[in-house]
Image: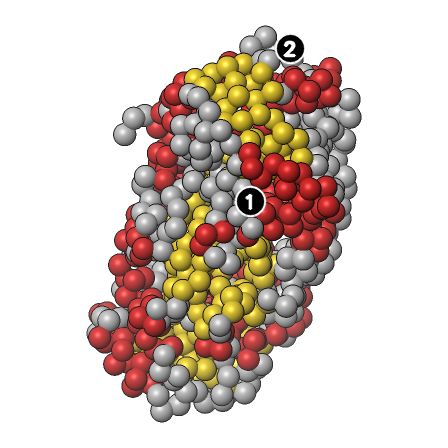
Amino acid sequence: MSKSLASREDFNDPEVTPEVARSFGLSEEEWKHLIERIGRSPSYAELGVVSAMWSEHCSYKSSRVHLKRLPTTGPKVVQGPGENAGAVDLGDGLCAVFKMESHNHPSFIEPYQGAATGVGGILRDVFTMGARPIASLNSLRFGSPDHPRTEHLLRGVVAGIGGYGNCIGVPTVGGELQFDPSYNGNILVNVFNVGIARSEELFFGRATGIGNPVIYVGARTGRDGIHGATMSSAGFESEAESKLPTVQVGDPFMEKLLLEACLEIFATDCLEGVQDMGAAGLTSSAVEMASRGGTGIELDLDRVPRRTYGLTPYEMLLSESQERMLMVAKRGREQEIFEICERWGLDAAVIGRVTDSGRFVCLATPGCDPLRGMSGSGSAKVAVDLPIELLADEAPCYDRPQRAPAPRCVEDERSLIPAVGDHGKELIELLASPQLGSRRWIWRQFDHIVGVGSVCRPGESDAALIRAFGARPHEGEEKYLAIAVDGNARPVYLDPYQGAAMVVAECARNIVCSGAEPLGVTDCLNFGNPQNPETMWEIAEAIDGIAAACKALELPIVSGNVSLYNETDGRSILPTPVIAMVGQLRDLDDRLPLGFQREGDLVGLLGHPGRGHLGASAWLSAKLGAIVGSAPHIDLQAEVALQKLVLELARDRSLSSAHDLSEGGLAVAIAEASLARGIGAKLQLAPLGQKLGATACLFAEDPSRVLISASPEQRAALEARCERAGVPLLWLGHTGGRSVFLDPWAEIEVERLRSAHENALVSLVGND
């Protein structure tokens, strides 16, 4: 390349100094390495490119060394980590494409747009692979219900998720929600999407074919979202609103046009590769494509479609304007792309080419501003000229120091447990709390039936069940999927290894309790500052717990996300690994509801009754206002046996219902099963209470337990099946009536339970 690197005066750029580099998030060592590697001081645009690609958000520099321990392969894996999304085989040439991402920092700064663009981003990750998105989930964390900002943040996030998903026509079919003071200054918004594609027609983010054109497709570039990646790689200060310009602005109607245009382009076989412009915008998409393809990319920034006057190379490269794609077309096929984009009303332009240089080169003409009709002065200058390897494979990777914190567990928690006079009242209070109450206020703002794919409504099954139409719906191809998302930070706080393992097991248990077989996992690891050795220990331990559970359950992790620096003024969130999972329902008649279906059925507890762990439980945490006690432990082999049995029983049609025991323990599970159809139950819990104590019997959250109901005619067969499988079965009583009788401690009318449960969020958000 004959052109020399532009001077800072060419684009009126600030001077690049070590102080500026530090303000961009580079450490002193990283700055020195950069200078040594390129043999000169970087331009302002180059510094922006490096800081984005070396950010925690893009490079995973604190977690990469640990993520390698996760299992990522298996007989069902079509695409593992490293692409825009992962994929698992569904049979008949179809695969499920899915991923989960975080949009935590943007959602705290501007809850509506932060959450909305989080949905838009995860949708693009999926359809960039050539899949048609069919369903979304979310995992949300907010601060204390009585915190002055919680209502505003909750309303904004829910409205943003619903507004974007409803407009684009992709149903949000479920999710999960928790509140804790640790999220007062840093909420979590994790979003998941799954789509369907033909396995042989997947597309990948690779720039291949020297000389092939690089094409920009979609919305025009503005100044929104600049510094988004680096902002998401740093903690908050008290005045987070000052970072509002770093939040992207979404347009779901533009995304719908982009989705349909992309799927039409994919069907023409005119592409070599395609990549969503997500975090770090044009920079990350170009660099990642070149890195995967083992090539270089040269961009002509003068040709970038723009909607804002006076954009500099730095701004064009780092803008995170939404609804944009970068495509590498086969030479000579460009016109086909342009014609499709024109039909869908989208901008499209050739902005570069694939090279054999192994470098990321960006040219721009000083003063060029197409919106003002200005072509600029002189010839194009080199704004960026950097090795692809420097930005990708050579990005910093740290094995940061770890230190276990002071023990948080109290092994003998009996002294902590307050006396309970009225267990019925305690159950009512749990059901009426925002922590465990009905999410109907949220569900009704999401269109969960658009696209006619939903098999059940939210809250009817432990996992959402959806019809999985093919990427080309007119072909009528159809499978049935179960999808679930879970995360419980309280046990993770007490013991990151055990707590994270239990999150994986619970998510898989929810899939199985719906009648489906788990196939694959995506994760979102939300933690504080990795430069804090105690936080880094939490991260490493949680990853090992996830790995152990996935290996035991033979579940590969095919995609995921790491979100660090979730803290404000040095105060970290609870360690919050979130797991989402895709399962396949063999037959629609295999599905299991969570609620009691008819009167007179037997009610049983499947799995070991537990040891009565109240530590980290919802009940004890609410009573004491703190996470204390002993950490529950999970027997992974017992979990495997339990899930295998439940799946077999579902496929044999031996059960009427199945409901995982999780937050709130046995009492809450029984209440939720009764509320589903308004059917009460008379249950004899005294024998279990004698072993565990009344309070622990009702509210302990020991893992690996499932509440079942079945016809009395199935009793002998179920007992025999459980004995052969080595899975304990304890009959508790039978369904019937309009009250839940937890003999000998409580009798509560179902309608009273319903009133408490349905109004749980009213105190927070009102009656609207």
Residue 390 picture quarter? bottom right
Q: Amino acid at mark 2?
A: Ala
Q: Is residue 66 visible?
A: no
Residue at image mark 2: 419
Q: Which mark is residue 654?
A: 1
Q: Measured from the top left, where is residue 474 in percent x and y?
A: 31, 70
Q: Measured from the top left, where is residue 101 in percent x and y?
A: 50, 54
Nearer-the-camera pick, 426 or 528: 426
* Position of 432 relative to 609 (above/below): above
Q: What is the residue that sits farthest to the bottom in this orientation?
A: 332
- The number of numbered discs placed on residues in the rendered structure image is 2
Q: Earlier in the sequence, mark 1 or mark 2?
A: 2
The residue at the point 50 percent across, 40 percent down is: 656
Mark 1–mark 2 CB contact (< 8 Å) = no
Q: Is residue 344 visible?
A: yes
Q: Amino acid at mark 1?
A: Ser
Q: Quick one: SS at disc 1?
A: loop
Q: Quick one: SS at disc 2?
A: loop
Side (left or right) of 394 relative to 296: right
Q: Residues within 10 Å of mark 2 (few under 14, many from 20)?
A: few
How is the protein colored in the picture? secondary structure
Nearer-the-camera pick, 269 or 239: 269
Residue 469 picture quarter? bottom left
